[in-house]
Image: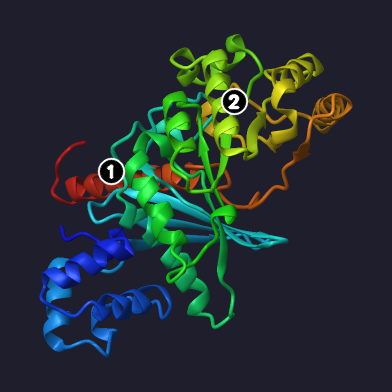
Amino acid sequence: MKPSIYSLSRTDLTDWVLAQDEKKFRATQIWEWLYRKRVQTFDEMTNLSKDLIAKLNDHFVVNPLKQRVVQESKDGTVKYLFELPDGMLIETVLMRQHYGLSVCVTTQVGCNIGCTFCASGLIRKQRDLNSGEIMAQIMLVQKYFDDRNQGERVSHIVVMGIGEPFDNYDNVLNFLRIVNDDKGMAIGARHITVSTSGLAPKIREFAREGVQVNLAVSLHAPNNDIRSSIMRINRKFPIEVLFEAIEDYIDTTNRRVTFEYIMLNEVNDGVEQAQELADLTKNIRKLSYVNLIPYNPVSEHDQYSRSTPERVAAFYDRLKKNGVNCVVRQEHGTDIDAACGQLRSNTMKKDRESARARIAAAKAKAGIKA
């Protein structure tokens, strides 16, 4: 399969153009066609020679994704199911925020982190996405608005979809640099957030990249007992190791870290856990923020349920009394397949059921007993 041209940084594209014995300015033209005019084929690049267009078609595709399903919520959230060139499925979510249009991108097909409450991990990791496949998600969401002539533009990115971004470190980092390029989509680094479940060595490495994007950590528990029971990654990088890496990140970058905390009823949402969380973050209070997230139930994980409003309020109040910067996150897309990985999982289930039905029908028509 030919790679997507979205995998190339502007420097990479310039190097490729020069290797084709073309003038350097051709790279700028191609880049503008891709990210400013946002064409979906090389043939639309009308100021390029036929020979260069032929070379581009020989070496690359533009967008490698195929749109399978689009779900639109009453609150404006849009959830996309995209098919990759090898037939695998990924999800992307557009959320309307008061500050603009935010897109949540996927970085892996499946996930190996092993969070017991998450729909993303129902299917083990099949492979990493390359940076072009990650970038293509942004471009197709933007095309969704371009086609409607609404004049709206993707302004924020959260790398929090299916998969662990730091388990696909190089591709994610290349994507960040491409989407941040000031002559391309030009999405500001401070409008981009990367989330990790807690790969401590990669947090330390990320601190030294100088990319200026925001870091979020999926914490979900204030102690090792609870966190290890719901997040397998904690057995490899327990809270003590994780927080040493986080403090190193803050010391190196002087940037704030956001803690994501999914509220699981009578699992991690008691006031005693709130106090533990306040104590845990005490040393980094000025440069940390806690995001309390209502749980979207997943049928395959029926041992968990959403925290009651009373328990959420009590948890929030205890954090605030301890001076913790925190908020209860606004919900998006509750009337569609809201949980991360849920649309993909449900679609795959329907595809399997449809395939079994077709096989059964074919056998019945041929007079073969099931």
- The quarter of the image holding the N terminus is bottom left
Q: Quadrant of residue 113 in the image?
A: top left
Q: Which residue is pictured at 29% across the width and 63% down the height?
A: 11
Please, what secondary structure does the residue beneath circle 2 have?
Answer: helix
Residue with the most extreme top position: 225
Labels 2, 1: front one: 2
Who comes first in sequence, dot 2 or dot 1?
2
Q: Is residue 135 left or right of residue 130?
A: right
Which residue corresponds to the image point at 64% horizontal and 37% vertical from the top-left? Answer: 258
Residue located 59% across and 30% down the image: 251
Name the disc covering residue 356, or none: 1
- Report the residue marked by disc 2: 247
Q: Tell me how the rendering is colored.
A: rainbow
Residue 283 visible in the current orientation: yes
Where 215 falls versus 199 (above or below)? below
Q: Is residue 273 above or below residue 2?
A: above
Mark 2 neighbour density, 10 Å: few (under 14) some (14–19) many (20 or more): some
Q: Position of residue 215 (x, y in %)?
A: 56, 40
Label 1 sits on a secondary structure element that is helix
Label 1 packing within 10 angstroms: few (<14), some (14-19), many (20+):
few
The residue type indicated by label 1 comes to: Arg
Residue 21, above or below 74: below
Residue 212 position within the rendered picture, expressed as x and y whole percent measured from the top left? 53, 48
Is residue 356 left or right of 204 when viewed as pictured?
left
What's the distance in space between the residues labelled 2 and 1, CA to CA?
52 Å
Callout 2 amino acid: Glu
> Can you give x and y, in whole percent of width and height, for residue 254 in the image?
62, 38
Dividing the picture into quarters, in which one does residue 154 lie? bottom right
x 64%, y 33%: residue: 259
Left or right: 109 as drawn, with respect to 336: left
Q: Is residue 236 above or below residue 296?
A: above
